[in-house]
Structure formats: C-alpha cells, structure tokens
Amino acid sequence: MEFFNQAVTVLQTLVIALGAGLGIWGVINLLEGYGNDNRAMRS
C-alpha cells in the first residue's frame, strides 16, 4: 500500500508540473503573439 501511495504522490507532482509548464507555454505564446502584431504562431 505504501508503494501505491508513493506512486500517487509522484503522479500528482507530474500533473502539477505539466499544468504549470502548459500555463507558462500559453503565456509565452500570448506574449509572442502580441509581439508579432497579433499574428498567431503556426507550428
């Protein structure tokens, strides 16, 4: 059961890190968009 609890904790950390990374990426994309005369960046 202890291993399961540890696995859940690791997953929660990964999800939080992923969410933060996506949030930062979104903000950078917004700033780049405004910096480029509001033209959307195409990948």
Image (cartoon, rainbow, N blue to C red):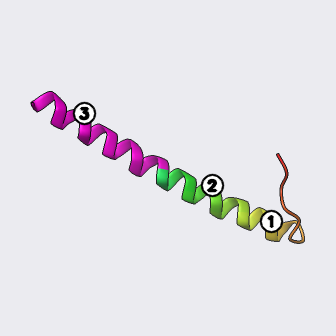
Determine the residue positioned at 10% across, 31% down.
2
Q: Position of residue 12 (x, y in %)?
A: 32, 46
User: The disc labelled 2 sits on which kind of residue?
Assistant: Trp
Q: Quadrant of the N terminus?
A: top left
Q: Earlier in the sequence, mark 1 or mark 2?
A: 2
Kindly state the secondary structure of the residue where label 2 is placed: helix
**Distance Cα–Cα, label 2 vs label 3:** 27 Å
In the rendered image, which residue does mark 3 sit on?
7
Kindly state the secondary structure of the residue where label 1 is placed: helix
**Distance Cα–Cα, label 3 vs label 1:** 38 Å
Which mark identifies residue 9?
A: none
> Is label 2 or label 3 in front?
3
| Residue 7 within the segment the image draws in magenta | yes
Determine the residue positioned at 33% across, 40% down.
11
User: The disc labelled 3 sits on which kind of residue?
Assistant: Ala
Determine the residue positioned at 48% across, 55% down.
20
Q: Position of residue 33 (x, y in %)?
A: 80, 65
In the rendered image, which residue does mark 1 sit on?
33
Dividing the picture into quarters, in which one does residue 3 lie? top left
Highlighted range, magenta: 1-18
Q: Give the vertical position of 11 relative to 24 (above or below).
A: above
Q: Position of residue 31 (x, y in %)?
A: 73, 67
Which mark identifies residue 25?
A: 2
**Distance Cα–Cα, label 1 vs label 2:** 12 Å
User: The disc labelled 1 sits on which kind of residue?
Assistant: Gly
